[in-house]
Structures are given as C-alpha cells and as structure tokens.
Image: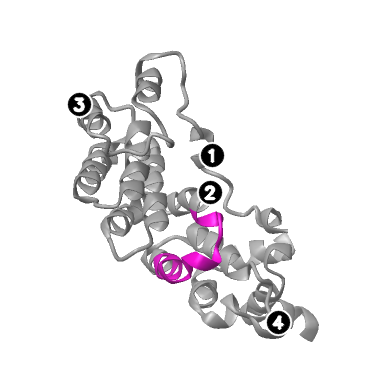
Amino acid sequence: MSDDTTAQNNIKYLIEKFARFGPQTDLDIVDQILSRKNEALPYIAKIAQDDEYWYSEDGEYASWTPVCALHLLSVIGGKEAINAFLNSIKTNYDDTGDWITEDMPAILANFGIEGFDNIKELLIDKKVDPFVRAGAARALFLISEKYPDVRDSSLQTLRDAISSESNDITRSCFMYDLVHFKDRDSLPFIEFYFENDMIDDSLMSMDEVLEYYYGKSSELNSLNNIMAKDSRYFQRFT
C-alpha cells in the first residue's frame, strides 16, 4: 500500500475532508467514516459542539459542517453520540435556522429507543429553547410509531408537559404533537385546553382535531413534514 493510500485511509484525513466540505463531502468518505464509528465518534462529537466549526474563520470549514455532524451522530448512535447531539442543539439552536423545526425531530428520532429517556428530559427542560423542546415532542411521536411499547410513556410525558407549561406557543406546539397520536383517552384532556382558549388556534382548531380523529382526513396540517428522513442527505444543504 502506497504512502498516499495509507494517508487517505487515516481517520484524521477523512474527518478533515468532512470538516472542510460539509454537505459537499464525497459520500465515499462519509461511508468510510461511518464504517469506523468508534474511531470517528470523538471527532464528529467535537465538530458538532465546538465553536471552531460553528463560527469558522476565513471559510476554513463549510458553514453547514456542524449540522452534517449532527446527522452523522444520529447514524452512529449510542449514549456518547446523543449527549453530544443534545449539547450541541441546546447551545447552537440560533445558528440552525429552520432545521430545528423541520429536520431535527426526525434526525433526533433516529437515535431510537436508546435515546428515548434523553429526549423526554429535553422536552421537559424549560431552560431549553421552546422550539428545540417542540422538536423533542415530535421525536417522541416518531419513536413511538416505531416502538409502540413507549407510546404510553410518550403520551404521559406530553400531557404532563402541557399541564405544566406557561408559554402559550410552547403549550400549543406540544398539543399539536399530542394530537398526532390520535389517542382517544387523551381527547377530553385536549378538549379542555381548547375550550379554555389555552391553545393557539392558528396552529389548529378543535374542529380540525375532531376531523383528524373521526373524519376522512389522515393528516393534521403538516404531518408529512415530520416523518423520518434519510440521515445522510448532505446535498440537502447545498
């Protein structure tokens, strides 16, 4: 094996390519990184959390590289990966734009049952940005669709979060995700909040909820927008 080939197989070389090119990284390099998850994890976790990558000077690193790193963390999985993911989004939510509300829930849900308790904790942590918490609520829905055994726990977590929430918008976002479960036992709870004008009706109305539960509609507004996506769609960011 030539020296050049050896250098190109070095994990630090692969990570440097990824850091420089972000969403434009050759997928062969991404595959090599993911085939060496244990080696790659400390580097990917650093990219996801370190200001050096979020606020790269002189364009040294691609602007979306840290977000791509968050995607890789969800593929790598495990406690260290999810902790790095959560630390990053708690700190850098202002720098991710619409990604927090549009894509983060599905990526967070990719951690699956192993990340379930962490996601519940994120949801109820009032020190965290409300839109990040709303993303955690959607992730609970997605995980519950795949792992029905945690459905009841997700429902209870959402009901508790709604009951203790003082912010109207955040409460409404949580309610939106509770409704998606289409849980009949939660319907009186849902009706109570609508009847007492505690839900923002620009997000949904009680009539829409009932149509979703009992009518022909299989969707509630933008349900398709929170379905799981491929965690390696780097060209998304170009």
Mark 3 residue type: Pro
Identify whether 194 is placed above or below 67: above
Mark 4 residue type: Glu
Residue 88 belongs to magenta span: yes
Query: Is any part of residue 35 visible from this angle?
Result: no
Task: State which quadrant residue 56 falls in.
Answer: bottom right
- The structure residue drawn at horizontal position 50% and vertical position 72%, both measured from the top left corner, is 41
Q: For mark 3, what is the residue?
A: 188
**Quarter of the image where the N terminus is located:** bottom right
Q: Nearer the viewer, mark 2 or mark 4?
A: 2
Tell whether 135 sits left or right of 121: right
10 Å neighbourhood of mark 1: few (<14), some, or many (≥20)?
Answer: few
Q: Secondary structure at mark 2?
A: helix
The magenta span reads 84-100
Spot occupied by residue 20 in the image (x, y as percentages of width and height): 70, 76
What separation in Å lies between label 2 and label 4 (alpha carbons)? 27 Å
Q: For mark 4, what is the residue?
A: 60
Mark 2 residue type: Glu
What separation in Å lies between label 3 and label 1 (alpha carbons)? 27 Å
Tell whether 31 sits left or right of 103: right
Q: Earlier in the sequence, mark 3 or mark 4?
A: 4
What separation in Å lies between label 2 and label 3 (alpha carbons)? 29 Å
Disc 1 vs disc 2: Cβ atoms closer than 8 Å? yes
- Is 170 or 212 nearer to us in this picture? 170
